[in-house]
Image (cartoon, rainbow, N blue to C red):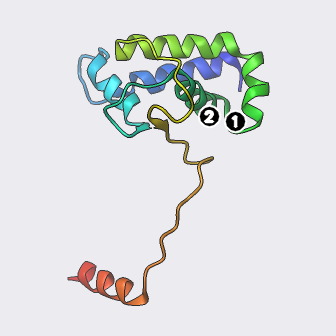
Amino acid sequence: MTREEREKLFWKCVNRSHEGDASGVMDAEKCAEYVRGWFLPLGKPLMRSEVVEWVMWAFFGVGGAEEAEVEEVVEEEVDGYVHVLEGILGYKFEGGLEGEGPKGMRPTVDPVKVTHRPLVWYLVSGFLASI
């Protein structure tokens, strides 16, 4: 994906918050809520390292070990996206240590935690769903 395509995608995601709004004007609060929704747990201030990691996943399709290699090449572009997100949320992201702040959700990279349930669980929940 080219830089122009990533910028177009970024602004499409940022402006997503006003879908259905006849005015077409971005609502900063809705947009901030949308961005915060990608980070868990909610309510804590976001850390810069986590936001950079999330931006790298969302707009560059990288995560884990390959992230450091790509980040050096596109550092200016990533910093621009992070700066816009800081403006939307209304505060500068703190440096922080890994794991201190909310962790960004990256569904294609993060491990899936599977919980096994007994067969009876599925029978009961299937029966209740059919009522």
Q: Quadrant of residue 119?
A: bottom left
- Give the CA separation, mark 2 to mark 1: 5 Å
Q: Is residue 110 above or below residue 131?
A: above
Q: Residues within 10 Å of mark 1 (few under 14, many from 20)?
A: many
Q: Is residue 124 above or below residue 45?
A: below
Q: Quadrant of residue 71?
A: top right
Q: Which disc, if any, is residue 57? A: 2
Residue 113 shown left or right of residue 17 in the figure: right
Measured as percent of width and height from the top left, residue 74 is found at: 72, 16
Residue 67 shown left or right of residue 23 in the figure: right
Amino acid type of disc 2? Trp
Q: Nearer the viewer, residue 128 or 71?
A: 71
Measured as percent of width and height from the top left, residue 70 is found at: 76, 25
Q: Give whichever of discs 2 and 1 has the lower sequence position.
A: 2
Measured as percent of width and height from the top left, residue 9 is found at: 55, 25
Measured as percent of width and height from the top left, residue 97 is found at: 55, 27
Residue 116 shown left or right of residue 98 in the figure: left
Q: Residue at x 25, y 25 (%)?
A: 21
Q: Quadrant of the N terminus?
A: top right
Q: Which disc, if any, is residue 62? A: 1
